[in-house]
Amino acid sequence: MRQILEAIQSDATGVELAGLEIPESYRAAIVKRDEATMFEGVDSWDKDPRASLHVEEVATPELAPDEVYLAVMASSINFNTVWSSIFEPLPTFGFLDRMGRGNEWGKRHSLPYHVVGSDASGVVVRVGSAVRNWKPGDRVTVHCNYVDDQDPSAHNDSMLASNQLIWGFETNFGGLADLAVVKANQLMPKPTHLTWEESAVNALCSSTSYRMLVGGNGAQMKQGDSVLIWGATGGIGGYAVQYVLNGGGTPVGVVSSPERAALLNRMGCEAVIDRRAENYQFWSDENTQDESEWRRFGKKIREVNNGEDVDIVFEHPGRSTMGASVFAVKRGGTIVTCAATSGYMVEFDNRHFWMRLKKLIGSHFANYAESYAANKLLDQGRIQPLLTTTYDLSAVGDAALAVHHNEVEGKLGVLCLAPSEGLGISDPDKRARIGEDKITIFRS
Ligand code: NAP
């Protein structure tokens, strides 16, 4: 990999890169099948990714005709890597084994280890024989929607494909590594004004938020809508705030500290609720929700939102908040959800839901067109990367623990082949035009 890195750093041509040997093994962050029960009996919160995530050499798999080898310059931590590393709700080896029972190429994925990671920026170093639109030397980012497009269900909206998977979570050979195996239809041009690590942190979260709020498959926010955003300085929440502001809406951001509230204000989000300061107790015990707390929450929303209920709720905490979200959205409003960080068995009062004609939309990542549109907005400087801090790949466990314990705002970048931060900008003038302060708004 050192030769490949040197070639990238010296701006080698695509032909030169294509002439370099692909190493037989590479450095990768993995979880191990024989450790999948290591946390049995341990409380979720205490499951420590530092014990389960290992950085080791793994064998380079063969390349399928529709795939590329990517030299990964940087990657990022997503919550799905936390789930993989704590083996919740299930160890990810079941996904890999299902792939293994599929076609010849699927068999490669069922291994005693799982290379995790669902984001990457880097340089294409080899393309399979069926790859038409990309070539060695292309600088790219990767979205994580993994579909076999030779299946009719993968057309129209590929997120509805029966074979849809999330790369680096439900497939092997993901992005937290020096080399990755990526389908050609996951590639997108790297924004030219961003560094490797700034480019690597966006695709998963930004595309998810795009589909939830902007694209035709989600809540379809209109100008003038107000949108309640849980975890508004978190990964998906931070992009959601930007999409609402860009789309002429009013974000109502929920966070859990004055520092996060101040960060939201700096982003241009004026309506902010500090859920910790308000001390909401939506659940009075494990089985009972407290409607008076939902009412108190609704009153607070109107207080910060010009006396109005919100048109849309951007949901993802799940069990702890869904009851309040369904209650608080306006009559006829929409709750759009993509996750359940605090628990997936959610509960809400159906009377408030049907009598007030509300809508609940399930959303999951984004199709290629939606991811591409989200990537274009980043490239235009209309959406900013939410990079807070970077870690070296060797410290991937520390990074995953920080996300698991809700200790960070925005996104954590991970340097893979990139030897330091700040590299990879190919259009410094554009960067200056967009503005360093905007691009680095989440840097601590
Ligand atoms: P993140 O960066 O950790 O941010 C989550 C935010 O949620 C935190 O900043 C926290 O904000 C808030 N939060 C956490 N627990 C909460 C609770 N009990 N009640 C209210 N707020 C709470 O994570 P993320 O990347 O944004 O991802 C969020 C969730 O979405 C994860 O479960 C992830 O797996 C999922 N996800 C799903 C998809 C998909 O395609 N389906 C894509 C991306 C992410 P405060 O403490 O400041 O309030």
Image: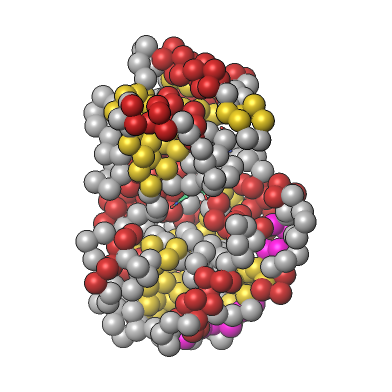
Residue 374 in the image, given as x and y percentages of width and height: 32, 49
Quarter of the rendering containing residue 301: top left
Q: Nearer the viewer, residue 401 or 83?
A: 83
Range of magenta residues:
49-63
Q: Nearer the viewer, residue 158 or 344?
A: 344
Residue at 52 percent across and 33 percent down: it is 321
Q: Residue 435 location, x and y as percent?
A: 38, 36
The residue positioned 74% from the left and 49% from the top of the image is 43
Q: How is the image coloured?
A: secondary structure
Say if residue 273 shows up in the picture: no
Q: Nearer the viewer, residue 374 or 428?
A: 374
Vertical placement of residue 128 versus 402, above or below: below
Q: Residue at x 57, y 35 (%)?
A: 320
Residue 50 sits above or below residue 283 on the image: below
User: Where is the N terminus found, in terms of image quarters?
Assistant: bottom right
Report x, y in % for residue 173: 52, 73
